[in-house]
Image: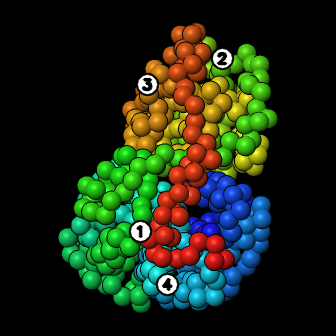
Amino acid sequence: MKILYLTNGYKPYRWAGTETYTAGIAEEVACRNHVVEVICVGQWDQGENYWNGVTEDFQNGIRVRRINLNWTKSPDPFRYLYHNPIVARYLEKLLREENFDLVHVTSCETLSASIFQTVKNASLPLFFSLTDFWMLCPRINLLHGNGANCNGRTTPDECLACMLMDSNFYHNAGEILPERILLPIFSHLSRYSFFTSKRGLRGWAGDMEERKRLLKHSLTLPDHRITASKFVRDVFIANHVDAPIDVQSYGHDLSWLSSYSGKSKSSLLRLGYIGQVIASKGVHLILQALAYLPQSCLEQISLTIYGNLNHTPSYSKQIRDLASSLPNIIFGGTYQHSESARIYSEIDILLVPSLWFDFPLIIYEAFATQTPVIATNLGGMAEAVSPDINGLLFERGNAGDLALQIRRFLDEPDLLERLRQGISPVRTIQDEVDVLESKYLELISEKNISYGEN
């Protein structure tokens, strides 16, 4: 088979959950003597023009084409995020020139949903992994601008009002007109690129009605849809997505586990956070929780935060300020996936305090090293973590409750070992690709495309 993966980004430049998932399955499929290629976005906000060409490189033998865009210079900034004719034309030409047997999309956040129709027009089998809520929410995570969780069942105007909460342009206009007058005006003008291209509105204002309609239609185009979370599937069903979505748990690339030899020795209870240092991930809650603990407890605890502190400078400053009054706080920066064995050898408990309906791969990486997890009682996190069996849950956004869960490990000396014993084996990437490979062949057969032709 010759398989093309379409995704938002790819290693080594992007290495979050979707990128990890995509690289894992792509490399395992390639190991099975199939031809694998990847298309993703490279540069996203740089360059003199909107389209800045395509660069190519190889990652572990896989050809990666990176489309370099400067989305801020798009002819229609908001619309091109979900309906991009330029990316569609590039993909259309490539599919004519290359004899792919199947296309698997793991994210269209940057490429736009236009890729779905392009693949269907080429009469190729189309497989889609729902790895986030981008198809329902322009913020991606169903997290409202005011910090509340959203169920996705919103009107176009409600979505627009949510997005405009981050627009200074809108706030300045609000000093002149009340929202009941201002929002309808913006709703009308947001259908026109001359308006949505203005600084302060780019990416925030757009035709929400069209976005909802087009993306709902796009969800009907794949021949097969999967997600790793029952919660995610249920959210899409509740949003009137009738196309069937199968739940298939993630497989994990655990090749790094061969160099893992257990936990190193420490007199401290070692807490760890691994991921993006952004507000929606709730990193501040960890530091606020530690501030609730008495000094006698803090002296027995260390916290290492792994992540890029330069991603959102204002939030990173907040994190550093919160950490400045606490002992034993370490900023570990980022690391290569191959270093995971060393990282987990120095973490006793992983903290996952996300404020949105997250279902992070990192929980299962921790479980692979018998590392219990304290996570938010929300979404995919609550699916993965069983309280008092393989970890603990705390109330969303409640730093005090998180502090209580952390303190339990100090007050209950047997808790850490008991939770370690409750962790089940983690599904491997090999197991997942066994299923994917079978489904790929089935879809190709249904499309009457000859296997082995390439």
The numbered mark at residue 122 is 4
Give the residue number, with chain letter if any, for mark 2: 300
Q: Nearer the viewer, residue 186 or 454?
A: 454
Give the residue number, with chain letter if any, for mark 1: 223
Q: How crowded is mark 1: few (under 14 residues within 10 Å), some or many (20 or more)?
A: some
Q: Are marks 4 and 3 in contact (CB under 8 Å)?
A: no
The image quarter in which residue 268 lies? top right
Give the residue number, with chain letter if any, for mark 3: 387
- Identified by mark 2, the residue type is Gln
Q: Which residue is drawn at 51% across and 25% down?
A: 390
Quarter of the image where the N terminus is located = bottom right
Give the x, y percent position of residue 118: 48, 82
Q: Report how far apart the C-alphas of labels 2 and 4 lie in the structure.
A: 61 Å
Q: Which of 214 and 181 is in front in this view?
A: 214
Q: Is residue 208 visible?
A: no
Q: How crowded is mark 2: few (under 14 residues within 10 Å), some or many (20 or more)?
A: some
Q: Do the residues labelled 1 and 2 touch (CB within 8 Å)?
A: no
Give the x, y percent position of residue 18: 56, 56
Q: How many marks?
A: 4
Q: Between disc 2 and disc 4, whose residue precedes?
A: 4
Q: Report how far apart the C-alphas of labels 2 and 3 lie in the structure.
A: 23 Å
Q: Which residue is drawn at 46% across and 75% down?
A: 447
